[in-house]
Amino acid sequence: MRSPVWIKARHFLAFIWVMLFALDGAIRAYLMELYESSPEGAMVLGAIANTNWRESSEYLSMHWHSVALICCGLALVALLVWHITGRNVFRGVRKDKRLVVFTLIVVLVCVVAYLSKPWRRLHPAVFWTQWVHSANNLKASLADQHVERARLLGLAIQAKPVLTSAGPSTVVLALSESINRDNLSLYGYLRQTTPQLQEQQRNSGDQMTVFRNAWSVDSSTLPAVRNLFGFGAPSSTQSHHLIALARASGYKVWWISNHDDVGIEQQHARLADIVQMVNRSPGRSSVSLDGEMLDELKSALDAPSERKFIVVHMLGAHPHYSLRYPKGQNPFDDEVDAIEASLKSKGTSLWVRRQRQEYDAALLYHDHIVAEMLRLTKSVTPPKGKVAWMYLSDHGQEVGHVRNHAGHSSSTEAGYRIPAIIWQAPSSESPPEGVSERPFRSDWAAWTVADLLDIHWTPQPLERNVLSNPYQWEEPRLPMAVNSFTK
């Protein structure tokens, strides 16, 4: 460039473009250092949506040292970038085919990067525009969620729930993510993915019920969780929320989560008395392991409250599978076994076979966490009173079962086939004979959990409680045909 106008325009544009990345990096580093959170984390978005100018000024008065240090660093970077982008070398460049080819390759890489959504969405110009939009949407919806939570608590109080048993009671609901029961050796899978749960089953005898035919009615997390806690009808103004009913009947409720999901936090978690969110990184790239919640569960179990309802929301085997277990702990890595041979014979791609190995490794780690949660629950069993534990997944996962695909699936049975397990202390009432063979729906799970909590209100349809004698199964409407809900 030789035109002074174009040189000046390039100077300003290059400076602004580079500083966008510098500012983006500074903000991300600040949040990660102080809060171990990314900008789109529920904690950050929730704080921004809930704040005002007074609170912001108070925050700056507390952390002005860190902010001033970052500003000084950015100022130095700005001076350096301004100097570099302002340089102009008037020197002829000899035309070289190699240089042309190299330039075309660089341009092609840049174009592909901008076309790729995972890369493009993190570009500062795109990311922060969407971030502001998300924060504004959350701010607008938070007021409604405050009102909705108050309405649900009021509705629960009006129902006048009563407890059908006296004495202390502790119920743990371990809710997992993306677990397909077909990949659990507890359900007959050839790879040993649940050795510890199988040991628990052998040691527990009749106290542990493994539902052989459990199904979700949703193939994604948010609607599945809404259906579960909303008794299968969350959109109805007369439908209760399980947590609100538990609180109205005298339970102290904990919500311990390894998810960072604003919707779940505002719609469900904030109804609890105590909320522990151990994960500050939303999305599939989160590396927070479910083992981080064990200490929080133990603290809740050790709390002195007489009646406790503890919800533990795990990441389970949520994609990406390789991030759901400790690095280097994949015993199925490149193992040529019956599962691998079966997938090969079906023509399953190498990528999906690799995903299956990582998925099964995630389930093996998950087995350790779930079994440890059960062990912790068993350890607080009092001589008198009730202790119960229930485990299920929100939905399943397709990993080469029917399609050459790995991930959520709304069009195959694998997206809906889930595990469900109940353990009850010896002093509790034994479940009906043959209950493990009953088909089970996750959107009816709240009726069963209410039974474990010994909560009664009117009306309370017992035909949707899988532990009750008058239980009546109804096939859910799934978007594809199911050969059998009992096989």
Image: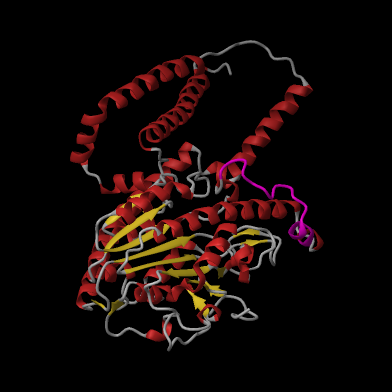
* Circle count: 0
* Coordinates of residue 389 in the picture (x, y in percent): 41, 66
Visible residue check, residue 179: no
Q: Residue furthest left?
A: 54
Looking at the image, residue 41 sits to the left or right of residue 356; the answer is left
At a point 46% along the width and 42% down the height, the residue shown is 127
The residue nearer to you, when weighing 424 against 398, is 424
Q: Dominant secondary structure of the magenta stretch?
A: loop
At a point 59% along the width and 11% down the height, the residue shown is 89
* Coordinates of residue 200 in the picture (x, y in percent): 52, 62
Looking at the image, residue 98 sits to the left or right of residue 67; the answer is right
Visible residue check, residue 404: yes
In the rendered image, residue 332 lying in the magenta stretch gets the answer yes
The residue nearer to you, when weighing 109 against 430, is 430
* Coordinates of residue 64 in the picture (x, y in percent): 26, 26
* Coordinates of residue 407 in the picture (x, y in percent): 60, 58
Location of residue 230 with respect to 143 vertically, above or below: below
Looking at the rendering, which quadrant does residue 478 occupy?
bottom right
Looking at the rendering, which quadrant does residue 88 occupy?
top right
The residue nearer to you, when weighing 321 against 16, is 321
At a point 35% along the width and 46% down the height, the residue shown is 43
Quadrant occupied by the N terminus: top right
What colour-coding does the image apply? secondary structure
Quadrant occupied by the C terminus: bottom right
Q: Which residues are magenta?
A: 326-342
Looking at the rendering, which quadrant does residue 34 occupy?
top left
Q: Residue furthest front?
A: 383
In the rendered image, residue 147 lying in the magenta stretch gets the answer no
The residue nearer to you, when weighing 349 against 304, is 304
